[in-house]
Image (cartoon, grey):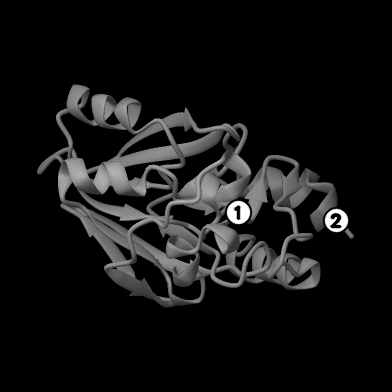
Amino acid sequence: MIVRMLTVGPLATNCYLVGCPKTREALVIDPGGDPLTILAEAGRLALHVRQIVNTHGHFDHTMANHDVKKATGATIAIHALDASMLTNPLASFSFWAGNLRPGPSADRLLQDGDEISAGTVRLTVAHTPGHSPGSISLIGDQAVFTGDALFQGSIGRTDLPGGDYEQLIQSIKARLLVLPDETVAYTGHGPQTTIGQERRYNPFLLE
């Protein structure tokens, strides 16, 4: 599995190009800005972007949806509970970045347990609400893309509409901490980590 992280957008969001080394098919996880950078890197790696996956609907994870979709023809996938944010600048908070233009709507509404594929790469959707109602993580082979659920030494904020602290802690413990220690956690902001490191040292998870 090819994984390339790009830090994009006004809130330094981690966007991931995830590709199949055999077919060169790829998906983009959380294109939160700087579409030209994302597209240029996909070209440099000779990856053909087929899908855009948003781990949740906040603007800093979706702002480049339109441009990446327009350039590649990729479909957009997001959990059903966050889908309305894509076309509502108030719900996605994109107005904070001066953007009042609705984004493209979802082509696929995800549910817990769904599979997302790119060539031979398979990712399983794990519904991990708490940061937002439709937040998801994507579980692959010894890797998990956690969006804004879990960070190195921290967790996603829960003070925005739809956030729920207790629900987020339960989501992380039930869906993420059950993964093997060596599982690499590719987070929505900040450096990558491992599930074992967060299980042992994350102060929010030691309570």
Q: Is residue 5 left or right of residue 183?
A: left
Which image quarter is the C terminus in? bottom right
Q: Kindly identify the amino acid type of the residue bearing the numbered disc 2.
A: Leu
Name the outermost residue toward the right: 207
Name the outermost residue toward the left: 23
Q: Answer yes or no: is residue 1 visible.
A: no
For disc 1, the marked residue is 93
Distance, label 1 to label 2, CA atoms, is 31 Å
Look at 16% across and 50% down and name the residue there. Answer: 73
Q: Is residue 132 left or right of residue 48?
A: right
Which image quarter is the N terminus in? top left
| Disc assigned to residue 161 | none
Where 90 sits versus 71, above or below? below
Give how far across and how far down residue 31 sits, in percent: 40, 43
Give how far across and how far down residue 3 sits, in percent: 35, 36
Give how far across and how far down residue 86 sits, in percent: 44, 61
Q: Is residue 94 left or right of residue 121?
A: right
Look at 24% across and 48% down and name the residue there. Answer: 69
Q: In which quadrant of the rendered view does residue 187 lie?
A: top right
Which of marks 2 and 1 precedes in the sequence?
A: 1
Look at 52% across and 57% down and name the residue there. Answer: 89
Task: Give the secondary structure at mark 1.
Answer: loop
Q: Nearer the viewer, residue 66 or 118?
A: 66
Q: Nearer the viewer, residue 206 or 8?
A: 8
For disc 2, the marked residue is 206
Q: How many neighbours does mark 1 have within 10 angstroms: few (below 14), some (14-19), or many (20 or more)?
A: some
Look at 48% across and 52% down and name the residue there. Answer: 144
Q: In which quadrant of the rendered view does residue 122 lie?
A: bottom left
Q: Kindly identify the amino acid type of the residue bearing the numbered disc 1.
A: Phe
- How many labels, in total? 2
